[in-house]
Image (cartoon, rainbow, N blue to C red):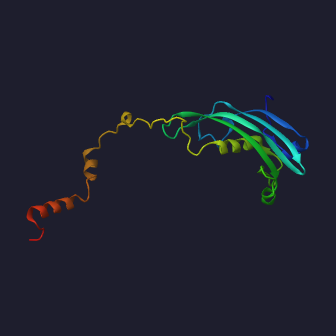
Amino acid sequence: MSARLPELIDPNLLADRNATIDGELPLSSFDRMAGLLSNDAGNVAVKLFFSRVGKLATVEGHIAADLVVKCQRCLDPVEWPVSSNIKLGVVGSIEQANNLPDGYEPLLLIDEDKIPLKNIVEDELLLCLPDIPKHPNDCLAPNISKNTPEPLPKAARASTENPFSILADLKKLETTNGSTKK
């Protein structure tokens, strides 16, 4: 594996050269994922092959990482292994993206030749994350008894009285007199 991956890549140039990128990117370098991870320690293994299929520049490869996200049931960290195959076609317009061969996703380059490598990898990682991460086994919700709220002050309790309590008083009057009319 190469010790250092390039920050910016030119997918068209790399496709012309049939280049391979093989290495690791630190999870801490992904800005858009920062809020989704409980822990950004570790790396993403990246292996990408650039080639041409006819005139179409393609990017194929694989990424793998062990992400640590927050379980939405118990709020504890949960390891989420990610292993994803990448199959992209480099296009310069939406029309070209609509005409890609089956199995290819678009890598849209408009008015630019070079793009950050981490953007390609981060896009794939974001697609692999679940909407609601949770432990594979049934975990329990946090124990609320540990965090018992303090009792409300007397003034706050008075303001939380039922506004319809007067109706209950009227009902009592009706049952004792048989009627509320005099």
Q: Residue at x 19, y 59 (%)?
A: 168
Q: Position of residue 14 (x, y in %)?
A: 87, 42
Look at the image and tell me in which quarter the C terminus lies.
bottom left
Q: Is 33 left or right of 163, judged from the image as shown?
A: right
Quadrant of the rendered image containing residue 177: bottom left
Residue at the extreme bottom? 182
Q: Position of residue 76 (x, y in %)?
A: 51, 34
Give 3 or 79, whichever is nearer the viewer: 79
Q: Residue at x 16, y 63 (%)?
A: 170
Above/below status of 99 relative to 154: below
Quadrant of the rendered image containing residue 93: bottom right
Look at the image and tell me in which quarter the N terminus lies.
top right
Give 136 or 121, whichever is nearer the viewer: 136
Above/below status of 3 relative to 93: above
Q: Position of residue 161 (x, y in %)?
A: 25, 53
Q: Position of residue 9 (x, y in %)?
A: 82, 42
Give 31 or 130, whichever is nearer the viewer: 130
Above/below status of 36 relative to 112: above
The mark tally for this picture is 0
Q: Is 171 left or right of 71, judged from the image as shown?
A: left
Give 115 or 62, whichever is nearer the viewer: 62
